[in-house]
């Protein structure tokens, strides 16, 4: 009896253009391209660097990109038509967990050390503070809002929030145009290296092992090219698995450092990928034997609860149905099984920095339980 798995049908589309924004957690895409993991699955990848998340979104919607490394919350914002055209979207897999941070200007960091509480530190500035995030419905906006609220600061009333692309954050902080920002590495680390800012908290300390960037595409792409979508997930899983190998993150840092990618010192990138100065629950994770990558529906629902919390959408009763349509769990399982990647049998209930627990259950009660909301 032949126990080997039956071969999958060939991809319908074999050349794919994949978008990314220059961040250390684009490592799976860079590894997939540099090592051509796609060839074993019938794919050739072309990477396309984008200057901002808005530009990436627009090209994904226009069909100029087939898929992208993107913010989890961005996908759900597009699904609901928030701040732009509405389009049915698909989350194919989670590419990484953790790896982001909130950075304060030296002036605000000194004030926080002196006064001991964020509201008093912000008041000491003598003006309304300005914080930056990278996209209104994106993960960085949600981490920033959550942390501010947990510190007793209302993110919609007590500060001004502006959108700045990740690579421009350090320049803005250097020019004293910001009091803080939330973005992915290596930009917080670069601010520390240049002496213009200090990390106050890592995103994995706000929500341990939170989902961050996802592999996403339009849902009609999955419908039209189901074998291609499956092959793309397999390719990215291979890349994520490779990143967990000894010495591989230092190697990928050399590629990420190139001018056409991030244009930042390779040693600085490698330090962030290795997570040497972060706790286990806060360090960036790409694979962990497949524990990282499953597109869990309850995690998608969490972003919807935060959109509601901050008045970005009205309450609605179909969050679970939305997440079930967006997160391609059946496709992921099929792809993972084909290359021997296990799907975790159980998922824990995260405990956030404020002590709140998200069990994926009653979304309305969860939102109502927050003392600070829009």
Image: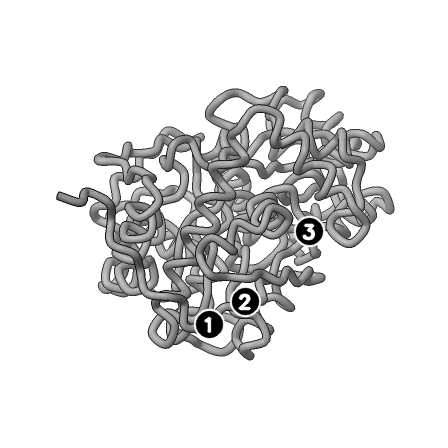
Depth check: give the residue in front, 166 or 30: 30
Q: Residues within 10 Å of mark 2 (few under 14, many from 20)?
A: some
The answer to whether marks 2 and 1 mark residues whose Cβ atoms lie closer than 8 Å is yes
The residue beneath circle 2 is 16
Earlier along the polypeptide chain: callout 1 or callout 3?
A: 1
On residue 13, which mark appears?
A: 1
Q: Residue at x 68, y 60 (%)?
A: 49
Residue at the far left in the pictured view:
1
Residue lying at 44% horizontally and 56% vertically, measured from the top left: 41
Residue at far front of view: 1
Q: Secondary structure at mark 1?
A: loop
Q: Residue at coordinates 66% horizontally, 58% vertically from top-left? A: 163
* Disc 3 crowd, CA 10 A, few/some/many (<14, 14-19, 20+): many
Asked if residue 80 shows in the view, the reply is no
Asked if residue 333 can be seen in this view, the reply is yes
Q: Nearer the viewer, residue 50 or 252?
A: 252
Would residue 85 appear left or right of 327 to someone viewing this image?
A: right
> What's the distance in space between the residues labelled 1 and 3, CA to CA?
26 Å
Marks 2 and 1 sit apart, C-alpha to C-alpha, by 7 Å
Q: Secondary structure at mark 2?
A: strand
Residue 108 x, y percent position in the rendering? 73, 33
**Discs 1/3, front:** 1
Q: Is residue 175 above or below residue 62?
A: above
Residue 53 tag number = none
Instruction: Give the SS element for disc 3.
Output: loop
Q: In terms of sequence position, does the residue under pointer 2 or pointer 3 come before the other? A: 2
- Label 3 sits on residue: 22
Q: Would you call the spot at circle 1 few (<14 residues within 10 Å), some (14-19), or many (20 or more)?
A: some
């Amino acid at each position: 009896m032949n126990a080997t798995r039956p071969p999958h049908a060939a991809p319908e589309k074999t050349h794919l253009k994949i978008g990314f924004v220059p961040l250390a957690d684009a490592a799976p895409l860079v590894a997939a391209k540099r090592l051509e993991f796609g060839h074993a699955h019938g794919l050739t990848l072309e990477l396309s660097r984008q200057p901002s998340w808005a530009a990436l979104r627009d090209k994904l919607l226009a069909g100029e990109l087939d898929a992208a490394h993107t913010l989890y919350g961005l996908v759900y914002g597009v699904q609901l038509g928030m701040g732009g055209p509405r389009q049915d979207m698909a989350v194919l897999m989670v590419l990484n967990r953790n790896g982001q941070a909130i950075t304060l200007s030296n002036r605000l960091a000194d004030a926080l050390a002196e006064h001991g509480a964020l509201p008093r530190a912000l008041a000491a500035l003598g003006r309304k503070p300005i914080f930056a995030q990278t996209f209104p419905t994106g993960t960085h906006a949600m981490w920033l809002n959550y942390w501010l609220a947990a510190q007793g600061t209302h993110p919609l009333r007590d500060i001004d929030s502006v959108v700045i692309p990740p690579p421009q954050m350090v320049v803005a902080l250097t020019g004293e145009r910001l009091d803080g920002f939330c973005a992915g590495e290596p930009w917080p680390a670069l601010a520390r290296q240049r002496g213009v800012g200090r990390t106050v908290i890592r995103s994995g300390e706000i929500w341990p092992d939170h989902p961050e960037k996802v592999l996403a595409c339009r849902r009609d792409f999955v419908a039209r090219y189901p074998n291609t979508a499956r092959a793309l997930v397999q390719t990215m899983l291979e890349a994520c698995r490779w990143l967990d190998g000894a010495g591989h993150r230092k190697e990928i840092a050399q590629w990420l450092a190139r001018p056409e990618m991030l244009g930042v010192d390779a040693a600085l990138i490698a330090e962030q990928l290795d997570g040497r100065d972060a706790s286990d629950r806060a360090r960036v994770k790409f694979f962990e034997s497949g524990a990282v990558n499953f597109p869990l529906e309850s995690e998608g629902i969490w972003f919807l609860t935060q959109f509601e919390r901050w008045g970005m959408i009205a309450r609605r009763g179909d969050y679970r149905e939305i997440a079930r349509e967006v997160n391609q769990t059946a496709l992921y399982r099929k792809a993972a099984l084909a290359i021997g990647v296990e799907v975790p049998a159980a998922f824990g209930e995260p405990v956030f920095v404020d002590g709140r627990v998200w069990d994926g259950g009653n979304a309305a009660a969860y939102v109502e339980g927050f003392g600070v909301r829009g």
